[in-house]
Image (tube, rainbow, N blue to C red):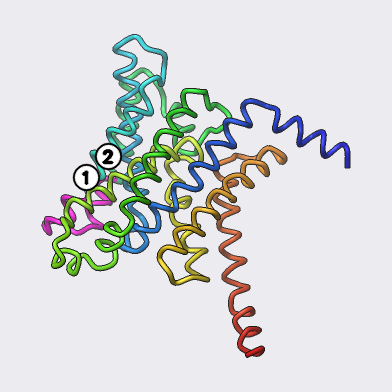
Amino acid sequence: MSQYLDYWADMLADPLIQRALLVAILVGGAAPVVGTYLVQRRLALLGDGIGHVALTGVALGWLIGAGLGLAPGALAVPGAVVAAVAGAVIIEVVRTSGRTSGDLALALMFYGGIAGGAALIKVAGGTSATLVSYLFGSLSTLSRGDVATAVALAAIILAVGLTARWALFAVAADEDFAKACGLPTAWWNIVTAALAALTVTVAMRVVGLLLVSALMIVPVAITQLWTRSFGRTMAWAALIGAGTGAAGLVAAYWYDLPPGATIVVLAILVYAAAAISRPVLVRVRSART
């Protein structure tokens, strides 16, 4: 027993683990807040499209940083933020204009983003391998600057996502009714898209751009198996996201696994367990009543 306690003490005393754990909990809690709105609007795959656009932003940040003589990757995250927000707004404008369907707009951003990233990183003097840590996450390379950026972005996401909850929910639940009530639905749709973009960029160092949608959507899917209230869904999804983020990071540390993939696999296993156990518990409750 003392051996395990010493192991836990050593792990928690590691500054790198402390930073990674803080970011994993923050991102795990903030991502489902935005994911709840996306699920309500049936835009669960929006994060994937934005993630690929953010890849172009990462490469563009490398290119600009190289031109300014900065350290490699110094502008990768700012570039990803700008590109992701711009891409999210463009997707929303194209979707609401009616000229192109939402899924087609996502497809265009999906393929254009990943192609642009691969091309620009080559121009910047890097290789496709340079993008791997952004595609799959790299908690092991988090710096204090990365943590500060993650804390700031997560604070913005939670502040807007929670304080504007009723307006965002009204637009997500029934856009036509919200418009009839006088809400500026186009504005709130853009706010939702921008929040999704910020979530993608803050989560890319945790689970990677290819898996970021899972962190936004899977905790919400787990919660929807048991709750129907929008507020409860959001609250429990945030708790589950933070819990799986922390537990997945610890499991990755113990068994030397990729943290991002471990977090997502754990979340999916929790969903599978909840889906399997739900009918059994419903029958037990029915039998008792």
Question: Residue beneath label 2, please?
Answer: 85
* Residue 254 place in picture, x, y as percent: 72, 39
Secondary structure of the residue carrying numbered label 1: helix
Q: Residue at x 41, y 24 (%)?
A: 127
Q: Can residue 233 be found in the magenta stretch?
A: no
In the shown orientation, is residue 133 left or right of residue 62?
right
The quarter holding residue 62 reads: top left
Q: Residue at x 63, y 73 (%)?
A: 277
Secondary structure of the residue carrying numbered label 2: helix
Q: Residue at x 62, y 66 (%)?
A: 273
- Residues shaded magenta: 92-109
Q: Is residue 249 above or below residue 163?
A: above
Q: Are marks 2 and 1 in contact (CB under 8 Å)?
A: yes
Main SS, magenta residues? helix
The kind of residue on which mark 1 rests is Val
Q: Is residue 53 above or below residue 92?
A: above
Question: Residue beneath label 1, please?
Answer: 89
Q: Residue extending furthest front?
A: 163
Viewport quadrant of the C terminus: bottom right
Q: Residue at x 30, y 26 (%)?
A: 60
